[in-house]
Amino acid sequence: MIELLFLLLPAAAASGWWLGRRDRHRRGLRPASAYPDLVRGLNYLLAEQPDKAIDLFVRLTEVDRETAEIYLALGSLFRRRGEVDRAIRIHSHLIERPQLTPELRGLALFELGQDYLGAGLLDRAEALFHKLVRLNLQTERALESLREIYQRERDWQRCLEVTDQLAELIGVRHPAEVAHYHCELAEEARCRQDLATARAQIDLALAADPNCVRALLLEGQMALAAGESERALELFKRVATQGPTYVPEVLPDLIRAMESCGEDVIAELARLVGKQANPLLILALSERIEHSQGVPAALDFLADYLARWADLAVLERLLALRARAAGPDDRARHYAQVALGVARHLLQGQAPYHCERCGFQAQALHWQCPSCRSWGTIVAVLPQPIL
Ligand SMILES: [Zn+2]
């Protein structure tokens, strides 16, 4: 609790509570002795008795600007410490004070909304943030919080409505996020076989963000499913240009489209590898080479790649092929199998995806990072070049 008080000092100082008498007089503020209950409350905090402190604070009916700022700082500190019930008591008390200015009432309502969010009481938080928007108080922060709530609830239509309001009222636009909301709606429509709606949502995604790789991937997959291989291939090639890191996500579909269009799959995959060395792409290409040209050619291809890139997944493939290629009595088979065991052990500790913003490690691609909630920041972990 001591650190809580230290954190409160700047708020108290800023509010004039800690200022010297002359300065207080000059600023028309009341001396510390005018806040005996507040001082008693802070003493309770010092004595690690936060509930007694809060009981005392909520009995105080007179709240001026200085005390309101201390209440706000105290409430948000309780919330950050995970003590949401205490934060709710403080902020609820504050918003009931009739003498509060609209600005402070807006701040207190917003903080209470954050408390409800922290406690998982989304309905109550939602109602408070809507109230703030209606009152034109803390509008941008309230709308951003509503967007967060609707994202958690996967209510993409409402996410779009809130981003529209943000653009209209504040001038803040979120084109990448809007495109993802439309992609989410397109995927939902596709799941229920409503292909017309899915296509319309993809168009809206691309209208919001022409660089939305996810929309191109979706449209390509839908085109392939509808037998439009050339259209699918064209879209997948746009993905390879705009977001090569996402090519492996549709690799089987891409290879199917290439085969349907009579393309040289090995040459085309090699061209994509030239754009970006992605382990999944290398593995797919090595499989093709193995089937068409045999194991030695695949081994040469993998060894050539590993001479330039430190890539454990590809090393594992090379060792597996090497072990398979050696004769049953060959010592080289034994050595390759031992090395293969080590490579597989190390691979288990590696996440194939990570968030470029917060570093979150993932086993699968998420369009929205489960940790920092950013959109489009989770990408495949790419190998390091060997210098
Ligand atoms: Zn993240």
Image (cartoon, rainbow, N blue to C red):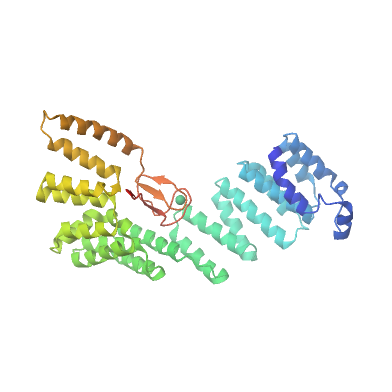
Camera sees residue 375: yes
Tell me: 52 left or right of 331.
right
367 or 298: nearer the eye? 298
235 or 83: nearer the eye? 235
Q: Look at the picture and state if 79 lies above or below 260.
A: above
| Residue 329 x %, y % | 11, 28
Q: Look at the picture and state if 157 lies above or below 314.
A: below
Tell me: 221 left or right of 88.
left
Tell me: 195 left or right of 6.
left
Camera sees residue 192: no
| Residue 124 x %, y % | 58, 52
Residue drawn 32% across and 56% down?
A: 245
232 or 104: nearer the eye? 232
Q: Residue 47 appears in which quarter of the rendering?
A: top right
Residue drawn 67% across and 42% down?
A: 86
91 or 41: nearer the eye? 41
Residue drawn 54% across and 58% down?
A: 146
Residue drawn 10% across and 33% down?
A: 327
**Quadrant holding the N terminus:** top right
